[in-house]
Structure formats: C-alpha cells, structure tokens
Image (cartoon, rainbow, N blue to C red):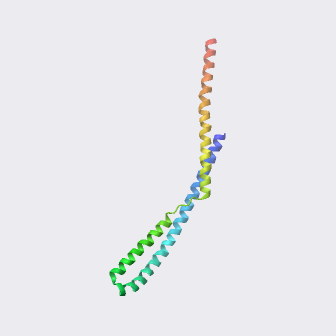
Amino acid sequence: MRTLRLAQAAAQAEALRLRRAARRMAVRAVLLAVAAGFAIAAVGFAHLFAWVMLEPVHGAGVAAAALTVADLLIAGVLVALAMREHPDPVDVEARLISRHAWQGVRQSLDWWGLVVPLLRAILLSRRRDRADQG
C-alpha cells in the first residue's frame, strides 16, 4: 500500500512540475512574441532615423554598416535575455518530491523483491518435507 501511495505522489508531483513548466514556456512565448512586434516597429523607426542622420554626413555605405552592427548587437541582447532559465520554486520542490517518492517505491519494491523469493523458497521446502514424510 505504501508503494502505491509513493508512486501516486511521484506521479502527481511530476504532473505538477510538467504543468508548471508548460505554463512558464507559454508565458515566455507570448512575451517574446509581443516583444518581437514592438522590436520590429522600433527597429524600423530607428533605422529610418539613423539613416536620415548618417547618410548625409558619412554616405550610404557607412550608414548601412553602422545600422547592421547595431542590429546584430540588439539581436544578441534579445537572444541572451530569451535564453535565461530561472527554475520555478514549485518546479524544484515538485521534482524533489517526485525523486523522493520514486526512491521510496524502488526501496519498497527491492524489499519485496527479497522477501517474495525467500517466502517461496520456504514454502517449497516445507512442501518437499511433507512429501518426504508422507
């Protein structure tokens, strides 16, 4: 019975952990999509402004190179922000509960794995003794 409760606790903890991870990923995807929309608009206006300011002074080639470098730097910062991973405290606790419960299941099954063959051997030896006596 304890084994069943431990397995159930492990399954519930794992389900909670997966639900929280899915929710976190969904929120992250929505935020990234909204940020991308604003970033596209802002980059468009920034390009227009930078081109208007740089082209008369430095020429079209320098203006294009400067805008390309700025775009790559901004893209790098956004990718770095999107790739940050902060584990949810509930996720961490659910993972610990799941590991603990599965460890208990394994220990319980290991104990039964030793007891059942031992009982089987005792019962077989008693049957043999009765058959020899009878």
Q: Residue at x 60, y 37 (%)?
A: 109
| Residue toward you, 103 or 68 | 68
Given the current orientation, which residue lies at the most extreme bottom position?
Answer: 56
Q: Is residue 16 visible?
A: no
Q: Which quadrant of the figure contains the N terminus?
A: top right
Q: Is residue 78 visible?
A: yes
Quarter assignment of residue 110: top right
**Residue 72 appears in which quarter of the rendering?**
bottom left
Q: Is residue 117 above or below residue 53?
A: above
Task: Please give left or right for residue 5 compared with residue 29 in the image.
Answer: right
Q: Is residue 130 left or right of residue 57?
A: right
Q: Nearer the viewer, residue 45 or 80?
A: 80
Query: Closest to the observer: 68 or 28?
Result: 68
User: Which residue is at 66% across, 40% downward?
Assistant: 2
Q: Quadrant of residue 44?
A: bottom left
x%, y% of residue 7? 61, 44
* Residue drawn where x is 45% and y is 75% of the image: 40
Tell me: residue 93, above or below residue 116. below
Which residue is situated farthest in the right direction here? Answer: 1
